[in-house]
């Protein structure tokens, strides 16, 4: 009886030991982190820095979010949030060529001068009226796609190059947004 119970416990424990699934690409990689934090260098130089966070779901797919803020008054965008979904075609974990689908909530500024009062107002000769610019902020929703490549070092540093475009819906000033960048960051 003791041999039967002992054999049963040994068999049950061996089933539980082999029940764990091993991710083969992650076990081969020295960098096993599933999170990345990156800075878009092109947008930073243009005056609206973009910070990207990416979470790796599987070896060949990830989700992420990019946040950009216009720090200069002349920047085209004042604020933007761009969630994205990526599929990778490289042999390593979230590395190599990828395609991306994204959505965007973008807020942009528009400055203009209102000259409509000139038609209804008569000014004395020699008087030159001055007009202050009127600034309005518009927030729009859009959908887009991009393609690019990601490069990973042995130390976990990440570099990306990607290019894409998106369409803004309901916009009166801008019809499209660019989804492009050269990013650097770290996988952890």
Image: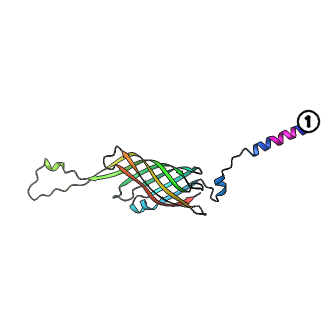
Q: In the rendered view, tell whether residue 93 sits above or below residue 21.
A: below
For the point 66% across and 52% down, the residue is 24
Q: Position of residue 57 (x, y in %)?
A: 58, 48
Q: Nearer the viewer, residue 73 or 145?
A: 145
Which residue is outermost to the left?
125
**Front one among 101 and 91:** 91
Front in this rendered view, residue 67 or 149: 149
Give residue 188's position: percent from left, percent from top.
Answer: 59, 57
Q: Quadrant of the N terminus?
A: top right
Asked if residue 42 is positioned above or below residue 140 in the image, the reply reads below
Q: Callout 1: helix, strand or loop? A: loop
Q: Residue at x 49, y 51 (%)?
A: 99
Residue 59 % position (x, y): 60, 51
Q: How many marks?
A: 1
Q: Is residue 174 left or right of residue 12?
A: left
Q: Main secondary structure of the magenta part?
A: helix
The answer to whether 47 appears left or right of 96 in the picture is left
Q: Does the magenta run of residues contain 156?
A: no
* Residue 187, quarter of picture: bottom right
Colouring style: rainbow
Write the start and end of the magenta stretch as one range: 5-11
Which residue sits at x=12%, y=58%?
127
Q: Position of residue 6 (x, y in %)?
A: 87, 40
Instruction: Please check the rendered image and state whether residue 9 is part of the magenta-colored stretch, yes or no.
Output: yes
Packing grade of label 1 (10 A; few <14, some 14-19, many >=20) is few
In the picture of the structure, the residue carrying the numbered disc 1 is 1
């Amino acid at each position: 009886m003791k041999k039967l119970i002992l054999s049963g416990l040994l068999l049950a424990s061996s089933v539980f030991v082999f029940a764990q699934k091993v991710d083969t690409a992650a076990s081969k990689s020295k960098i096993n982190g599933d999170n990345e934090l990156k800075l878009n260098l092109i947008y930073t130089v243009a005056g609206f820095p973009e910070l990207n966070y990416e979470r790796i779901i599987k070896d060949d797919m990830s989700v992420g979010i990019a946040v950009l803020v216009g720090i200069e008054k002349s920047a085209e965008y004042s604020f933007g949030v761009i969630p994205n979904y990526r599929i990778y075609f490289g042999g390593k974990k979230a590395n190599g060529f990828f395609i991306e689908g994204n959505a965007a909530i973008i807020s942009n500024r528009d400055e203009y001068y209102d000259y409509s009062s000139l038609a209804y107002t008569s000014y004395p000769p020699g008087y030159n009226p001055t007009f202050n610019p009127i600034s309005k902020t518009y927030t729009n929703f859009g959908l887009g796609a991009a393609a690019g490549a990601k490069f990973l070092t042995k130390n976990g540093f990440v570099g990306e190059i990607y290019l894409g475009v998106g369409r803004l819906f309901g916009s009166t000033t801008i019809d499209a947004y660019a989804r492009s960048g050269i990013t650097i960051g770290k996988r952890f």
